[in-house]
């Protein structure tokens, strides 16, 4: 089974450090090609758009599900309104909360939005979602397409999880895109760990954590240290399944994208890949698992 995490940068290619706007059909074709070449059984997506002008008004999660031949999928959005290139977000005051869309949502449902998605070829027993509040402060950041530093306020986020039916029984897979604010993202990661503890083991947690290198694994392993496995004799210790740089895509130097697992033996990993894609400033991180 191949699991992958991919921050798709709202489905746009990057040229000379800038996201490139594309016509509707071209945007959808380019993104569909990326998903097809990734060819994963479970894909966790971040920076996912739905009906945004900047990304060709494409429903990214639905495109991924169609290309993958998915058995099921969900898209969770916490930022609603239009992303105006060069001006930031024009938020919709009528949509302040968390929304979840899936195969039955229909193209007419909902306003333009932004969030995370989880797409799977394996059947799903149950879906779960948890809102993660925004940090009260923002930070000056380097933003693709802008020179120098740009002050960016934090945004609310979501953790999305599915209890998936595997060949050897159910397991839980989840996607997150954590805050870029130091310390706040650590608190969010711990909140997600506690939330997942109530769902069936093993656990596979994927996403862009905005935490570099071994830091997420060290945080989760430290929090879980000394705990006794309570479900079916599984090993509850968290492990980092892939240690490799994923950002920036053209010359990766830092790992912000992670695949962590609890209750998965060390020898379950059969392969790791970070292929260069035609979209995004991140490379996807794919892990072959015997699970």
Image: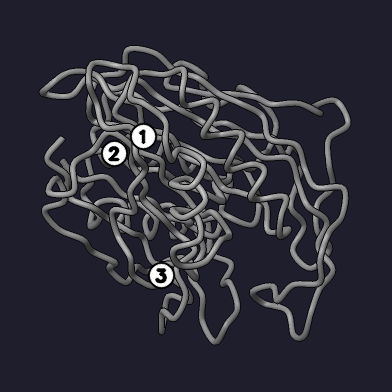
User: What residue appears at the point 34 percent right and 67 percent down from the top-left corner?
Assistant: 277
Colour setup of the view = one colour
Q: Are marks 1 and 2 in contact (CB under 8 Å)?
A: yes
Estimate the x, y position of residue 272 in percent, counting from the top left: 21, 61
Q: Which residue is mark 1?
A: 119
Say which of 51 and 274 sits in front. 274
Estimate the x, y position of residue 113 in percent, counting from the top left: 67, 39
Q: Which is closer to the viewer, label 3 or label 2? A: 3
- Pick the quarter of the image with the C terminus: top left
Estimate the x, y position of residue 99 in percent, counting from the top left: 65, 24
Q: Which residue is mark 3?
A: 246
Q: Which is closer to the viewer, label 3 or label 1? A: 3
User: What residue appears at the point 11 percent right and 53 percent down from the top-left corner?
Assistant: 270
Asked if residue 166 is positioned above or below residue 79 in the image, the reply reads above
Q: Which residue is mark 2?
A: 42
User: What residue appears at the point 48 percent right and 56 percent down from the top-left corner?
Assistant: 7
- Pick the quarter of the image with the N terminus: top left
Q: Which secondary structure lies at badge 3? A: loop
Q: Which secondary structure lies at badge 2? A: strand
Q: Residues within 10 Å of mark 1 (few under 14, many from 20)?
A: many
Say which of 207 and 46 sits in front. 207
Q: Residues within 10 Å of mark 2 (few under 14, many from 20)?
A: many
Q: CA distance from mark 1 to mark 2?
A: 6 Å
Q: Residues within 10 Å of mark 3 (few under 14, many from 20)?
A: many
Relative to 121, is 7 on the left or the right?
right
- Say the numbered circle drawn on residue 258: none
For marks 3 and 1 on the same chain, the one whose residue lies earlier in the sequence: 1
Relative to 94, is 286 on the left or the right?
left
User: What residue appears at the point 26 percent right and 32 percent down from the top-left corner?
Assistant: 235
Quadrant in the rendering for residue 257: bottom left
Q: CA distance from mark 3 to mark 2?
A: 18 Å
């Amino acid at each position: 089974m191949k699991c992958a995490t991919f921050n798709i940068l709202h489905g746009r290619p990057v040229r000379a450090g800038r996201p490139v706007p594309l016509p509707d059909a071209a945007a959808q074709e380019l993104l569909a090609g990326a998903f097809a070449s990734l060819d994963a059984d479970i894909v966790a997506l971040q920076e996912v758009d739905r009906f945004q002008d900047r990304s060709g008004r494409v429903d990214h999660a639905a495109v991924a599900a169609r290309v993958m031949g998915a058995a099921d999928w969900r898209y969770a959005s916490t930022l609603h309104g239009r992303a105006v290139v060069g001006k930031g977000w024009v938020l919709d005051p009528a949509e302040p909360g968390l929304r979840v869309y899936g195969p039955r949502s229909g193209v007419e449902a909902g306003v333009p939005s932004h969030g995370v998605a989880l797409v799977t070829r394996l059947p799903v027993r149950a879906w779960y979602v948890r809102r993660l509040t925004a940090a009260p402060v923002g930070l000056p950041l380097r933003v693709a397409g802008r020179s120098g530093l740009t002050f960016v306020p934090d945004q609310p986020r979501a953790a999305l999880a599915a209890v998936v039916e595997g060949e050897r029984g159910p397991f839980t897979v989840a996607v997150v895109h954590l805050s870029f604010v130091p310390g706040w993202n650590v608190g969010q990661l711990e909140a997600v760990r506690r939330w997942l503890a109530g769902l069936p083991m093993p656990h596979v947690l994927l996403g862009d954590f905005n935490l570099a290198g071994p830091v997420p694994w060290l945080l989760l392993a430290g929090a879980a240290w000394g705990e006794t496995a309570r479900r079916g004799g599984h090993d509850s210790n968290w492990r980092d399944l892939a240690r490799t740089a994923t950002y920036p895509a053209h010359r990766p130097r830092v790992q912000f994208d992670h695949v962590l697992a609890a209750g998965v033996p060390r020898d379950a990993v059969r392969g790791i890949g970070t292929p260069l894609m035609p979209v995004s400033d991140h490379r996807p991180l794919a892990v072959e698992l015997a699970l």
